[in-house]
């Protein structure tokens, strides 16, 4: 099966739309009850949040309808197998220190299905740092030292690297006054503070800038400091923690394999109905039911809706009654991450251990080797910021994309490079994502995060873009999908038997 999403480019074949994906579902529509009968729950979206929510609801007996705008499972995380190699088109790296996604991995028998991304021992085993005025190669140990030290200095906003003021990565009520203070700053303002105090060397400034642009997908003045600090905390307050946990290991069989296992588990309950290629345009609440209207005019009703669409897509749906002002304002402002992620296949195995950072880049700012393809060529992953930013480029012209990647290579080796294939998904032009993983702007979290997490009547909001913990990552999506399903179960639980009060809660026996 092939999805309409994504594209490949080769020197001989040019650019071709669509990619093979085992997450494509056929038939695209399946109902286990008459469509006119109200469902217990409608789940909108089949990213990890929607998949986990629908699995948890159906396994607990809830008649659930899943509505998906795409032709496939996975949302902003999906894999495509081409010539025997799995390309992760969106979200990629997971780890056993990410508790919610690891539970899914182990539950579905994929606990031994791990690949390590950064492999030493290749011919070009070093990191290339490119700046406006210079280019040099450094060992990966030196790369870890310089990036780690720069990130630690950047995150040390309290004199203790957040070890006490932001101790628990999944906590939500820690140091609220300090959180609000840091939320007011952009990453650029924090970097300006450090440069005024002469705390970073020129090389440290360059690698830190490239790292932050890669992380947030935009110019630093548009990226909120608080999200960058949260990444530091998620990395266990250590210099290499984030890299070791979040950019190091991935599933060998690909995320689409795990998506199918979760989906088929829900389907096996006999409680799951679904319809794909069905964008939603309107959600209306009236007389205790929620009516969901699709673009083609179809409508369905349910007692509750779990909405898992990305933050930048939220404003595309009409709500009746309207969303709160804070929710509407949050949707208008949105996430700032408009990253382009590009897979590059280079001829030969030489570059499998190589990495790069560029500040500024020329369309891409970072790349690194990610294993060998079955035909012994190097697969690399490259990242570039918002196409409209100062160092961004679109994915329209493949020669420009190719040149933006070649700019990251050592200058004396650029002429001999042979690129066999480019694979990508243009998330910024995708109407169902309108950007990549979530990275919030300054002043957003304090104003809007709590409002986004609150239900709107019987509509529960469950995007990884406003989860706690690994917000914007796969683990955050799994977490908030699980929480939304549990909340639906609590709301729809019918008391029976004798009531007993336990720790202030009513428990029915």
Image (cartoon, grey):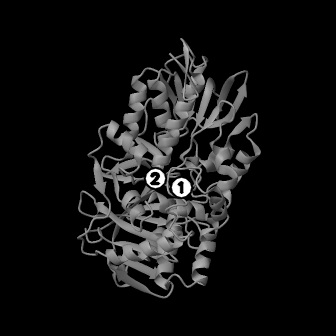
Q: Is residue 225 visible?
A: yes
Give the quarter of the image for residue 117: bottom left
Q: Secondary structure at mark 1?
A: loop
Residue 263: image tag = none
Instruction: From this view, report whether residue 80 is shown above or below residue 38.
Output: below
Residue 287, position in %: x, y? 73, 21
Residue 436: image tag = 1
Left or right position of 322 against 416? right
Q: Observer-nearest residue: 251 or 295?
A: 251
Mark 2 lies on residue: 90
Left or right position of 77 against 421? right
Asked whether the beta carbons under mark 2 and mark 1 sit within 8 Å of each other, the answer is: yes
Residue 171, position in %: x, y? 53, 50
Q: Quadrant of the N terminus?
A: top left
Instruction: From this view, report whether residue 403 is shown above or below residue 509.
Output: below
Circle 1 crowding by C-alpha within 10 Å: few under 14, some 14–19, many from 20: many
The residue most toward the bottom is: 133
Give the quarter of the image for residue 351: bottom left
Cα–Cα span, label 2 and label 1: 8 Å
Q: Observer-nearest residue: 172 or 186?
A: 172
Instruction: From this view, report whether residue 238 is shown above or below residue 406.
Output: above
Q: Observer-nearest residue: 242 or 165?
A: 165
Q: Is residue 277 visible?
A: no
Q: Residue at x 29, y 54 (%)?
A: 115
Of the image marks 2 and 1, the number of the one nearer the N terminus: 2
Residue 497, position in %: x, y? 53, 11
Q: Observer-nearest residue: 447 or 29?
A: 447
Residue 440, position in %: x, y? 61, 58
Left or right position of 374 against 457? left
Circle 2 crowding by C-alpha within 10 Å: few under 14, some 14–19, many from 20: many
Q: Secondary structure at mark 2?
A: loop
Q: Residue at x 51, y 79 (%)?
A: 205
């Amino acid at each position: 099966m092939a999805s309409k999403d994504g594209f490949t480019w080769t020197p001989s074949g040019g650019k071709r739309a669509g990619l093979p994906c085992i997450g494509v579902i056929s038939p695209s529509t399946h109902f286990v009850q008459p469509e006119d009968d109200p469902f217990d729950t409608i789940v909108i979206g089949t990213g990890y949040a929607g998949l986990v929510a629908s699995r948890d609801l159906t396994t607990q007996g809830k008649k659930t309808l899943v509505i998906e705008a795409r032709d496939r499972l996975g949302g902003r995380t999906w894999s495509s197998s081409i010539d025997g190699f799995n390309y992760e088109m969106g979200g990629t790296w997971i780890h056993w220190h990410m508790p919610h996604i690891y539970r899914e991995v182990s539950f579905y028998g994929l606990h031994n299905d791990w690949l390590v991304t950064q492999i030493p021992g290749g011919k070009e085993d070093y990191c290339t740092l490119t700046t406006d005025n210079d280019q040099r190669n450094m060992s990966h140990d030196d790369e870890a030292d310089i990036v780690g030290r720069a990130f630690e200095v950047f995150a040390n906003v309290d004199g203790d690297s957040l070890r006490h003021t932001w101790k628990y990565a999944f906590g939500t009520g820690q140091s609220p006054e300090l959180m609000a203070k840091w939320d007011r700053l952009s990453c650029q303002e924090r970097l300006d503070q450090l440069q005024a105090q002469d705390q970073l060397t020129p090389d440290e400034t360059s690698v830190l800038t490239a790292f932050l642009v890669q992380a947030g997908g935009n110019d630093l003045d548009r990226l909120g400091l608080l999200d960058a600090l949260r990444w530091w905390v998620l990395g266990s307050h250590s210099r290499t923690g984030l890299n070791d946990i979040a950019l190091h290991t991935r599933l060998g069989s690909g995320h689409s394999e795990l998506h199918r296992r979760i989906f088929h588990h829900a389907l096996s309950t006999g409680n799951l109905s679904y319809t794909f290629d069905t964008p939603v345009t309107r959600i209306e609440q009236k007389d205790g039911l929620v009516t969901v209207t699709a673009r083609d005019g179809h409508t369905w009703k349910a007692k509750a809706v779990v909405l898992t669409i990305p933050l930048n897509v939220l404003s595309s749906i009409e709500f009746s009654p309207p969303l709160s002002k804070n929710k509407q304002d949050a949707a208008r402002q949105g996430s700032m991450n408009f990253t382009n992620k590009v897979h590059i296949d280079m001829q030969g195995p030489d570059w499998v251990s190589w990495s790069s950072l560029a500040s500024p880049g020329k369309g891409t700012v970072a790349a690194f080797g990610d294993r060998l393809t079955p035909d012994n060529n190097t697969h690399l992953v490259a990242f570039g910021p918002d196409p409209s930013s100062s160092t961004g480029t679109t994915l329209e012209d493949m020669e420009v994309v190719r040149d933006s990647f070649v700019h990251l290579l050592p200058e004396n080796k650029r002429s001999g490079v042979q690129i066999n294939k480019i694979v990508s998904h243009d998330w910024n032009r995708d109407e169902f994502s309108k950007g990549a993983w979530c990275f919030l702007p300054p002043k957003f979290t304090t104003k809007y995060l709590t409002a986004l997490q609150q239900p709107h009547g019987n509509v529960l909001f469950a995007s990884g873009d406003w989860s706690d913990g690994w917000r914007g990552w796969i683990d955050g999506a799994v977490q908030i999908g699980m929480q939304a399903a549990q909340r639906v179960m609590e709301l729809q639980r019918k008391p029976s038997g004798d009531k007993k009060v336990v720790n202030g809660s009513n428990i029915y026996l």
